[in-house]
Amino acid sequence: MTTRTLAGFAAAYPELDPDAVDYEYLRAISQQLVPFGRHVGTLVTEVGPDRAVVEIPAVDEVRNHMSTVHAGALFTAADIAGAAAFVGAAAARLFTIERLVLRGGTAAYRKPAQGRIRAVATVDQRELADILAATASARFELSGKAILLDDNDIQVAKFTFDYVCDVVIAEADAR
């Protein structure tokens, strides 16, 4: 295991070994990071190198007055899934990430969301490659998306996200 001092964004994952990424560890920590997500009841069920999945359980507390899942709960799940997708995709270089901030996003609600909902998120691989290849401290833009599906795999919503990502390269990590 490589020992590094973790600051910024990476400090939330103190046991992460960039040479042998444990995605279950990333999932478990990601589950605890967003208090509002816990309030809504979201569950981070998957974090991997290609995507992350966050579920909204089928419970009354997330429904609106029309008995569909509230738009705020859908956004929360998509937002958490997007950040977790970045964590999984950038895991081997997470120690270089000072911050990842959601700058903006769009929402397209396609069908009434009912029952358990899964937010499946990814980040743009070309933009991510630039972040992972950074040899000097810099600010990057990163795009992501989350597709929200019901239990029948029907798409109920789609979110796109624009992030800003600050990379800090320590002298010891410069390539």
Image: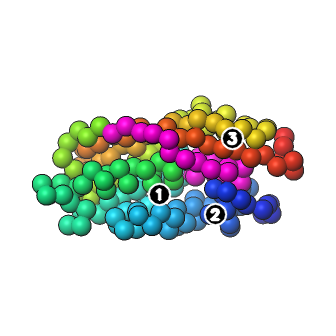
Name the residue: 67% across, 57% down: 8
Residues 33 and 156: in front is: 33
Name the residue: 33% across, 39% down: 107
Quadrant in the picture for the N terminus: bottom right
Q: Position of residue 132 (x, y in %)?
A: 69, 41
Q: Which mark is residue 13?
A: 2
Q: Is residue 25 left or right of residue 53?
A: right
Q: Give the residue type at disc 3.
A: Leu
Judging by the rendered image, the residue that carries numbered circle 3 is 132
Magenta stretch encompasses residue 97: yes
Q: Give the residue type at disc 2.
A: Tyr
For marks 1 and 2 on the same chain, the one whose residue lies earlier in the sequence: 2
Q: Is residue 54 above or below residue 155?
A: below
Residues 152 and 32: in front is: 32
Quadrant in the picture for the C terminus: top right
CA separation in Å, label 2 and label 3 = 17 Å
Q: Position of residue 29 (x, y in %)?
A: 55, 66
Judging by the rendered image, the residue that carries numbered circle 1 is 46
> Which element is circle 1 on?
strand
Provide the residue span drawn in magenta: 86-107
Magenta stretch encompasses residue 155: no
Mark in the foreground, 1 or 2: 2
Mark in the foreground, 3 or 1: 3
Name the residue: 40% across, 68% down: 38
Q: Is residue 18 left or right of residue 76?
A: right
In the picture as drawn, the residue positioned furthest to the right comes out as: 172
